[in-house]
Amino acid sequence: MRRDDEILIVVDVQNDFCPGGRLAVSGGDEVAPLINRIAQGFKHVVLTQDWHTPHHSSFASSHPGKKPFEMIEMPYGPQVLWPDHCIMHTEGAEFHKGLHVPHVELIIRKGYDRAIDSYSAFFENDHKTPTGLNGYLRERGFRKVTLVGLAFDFCVRYSAEDARSHGFETEVIEGACRAIDLNGSAAQTRASFAERGVVLA
Ligand code: VGL
Ligand code: ZN
């Protein structure tokens, strides 16, 4: 059993990121049974849930003439445009039905402001607007964060890097993640983790 001051963050294990979903990550559903087992070793678990408005500004369909996976310049910086996904209160935004973590203590939703995307569980994509997760973890006395889930090279990556920059000991269990791998983003993620002191387990 992990220490009392350790917490597992399970990132975006939702239908739209699994095969058959609208932004399917290859093998995304395979992480559910792995995470169920890993979670049994943690006293404390948080889930994140990508939770977008309809017509969210991160959707290619909101930008006439743009296609999914193209880039656009937003007021807060460059943004990948995605297929419509994880629209609040839809089936695609539900957690995968194979995910069983009965003792989850908090669900952090993100991406619910139409004007800004949010990959990280800590900050929206302006890298300024907090989700409140840091405050929660601090107030509850956690010191170490372990991350698993989808997608390795987007929401897991930015959540892990922000955890580290907030001073948490940070570990990612790559075997319980799957990547989108857009233009080498999985390799870039590993390099960035090495540079920032995020441990790949
Ligand atoms: C994610 C792209 C868009 C993720 C979420 O969970 O990694 N990626 N929204
Ligand atoms: Zn999203």
Image (spheres, rainbow, N blue to C red):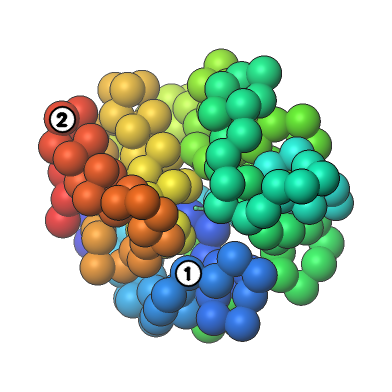
Image spot of residue 141 (x, y percent): 38, 30
- Observer able to see residue 101: no
**Left or right: where 54 falls relative to 122:** right
Residue type at the position of mark 2: Glu
- Ligand 1 closer than 8 Å to label 1 CB: yes
How far is disc 2 from disc 1 in space, using C-alphas? 26 Å
Residue named by callout 2: 195
**Badge 2: few (under 14), some or many (20 or more) residues near its Cα, within 10 Å?**
few
Asked which secondary structure carries label 2, the reply is: helix
On screen, residue 75 above or below 82:
above
Q: Amino acid at mark 1?
A: Val
> Which residue does the image show at 61% across and 20% down from the upper left?
76
- In the picture, the quarter occupied by the C terminus is bottom left
Residue that badge 1 annotates: 25
Q: Position of residue 144 (x, y in %)?
A: 27, 38
Say whether marks 2 and 1 touch (CB < 8 Å): no
Q: Nearer the viewer, residue 131 or 185?
A: 185
- Of residues 74 and 87, the one nearer the viewer is 74
Query: Above or below — where is 195 with respect to 37?
Result: above
Instruction: Report which quarter residue 90 is drawn in.
Output: bottom right
Q: Residue at 76%, 73% (x, y): give it.
A: 91
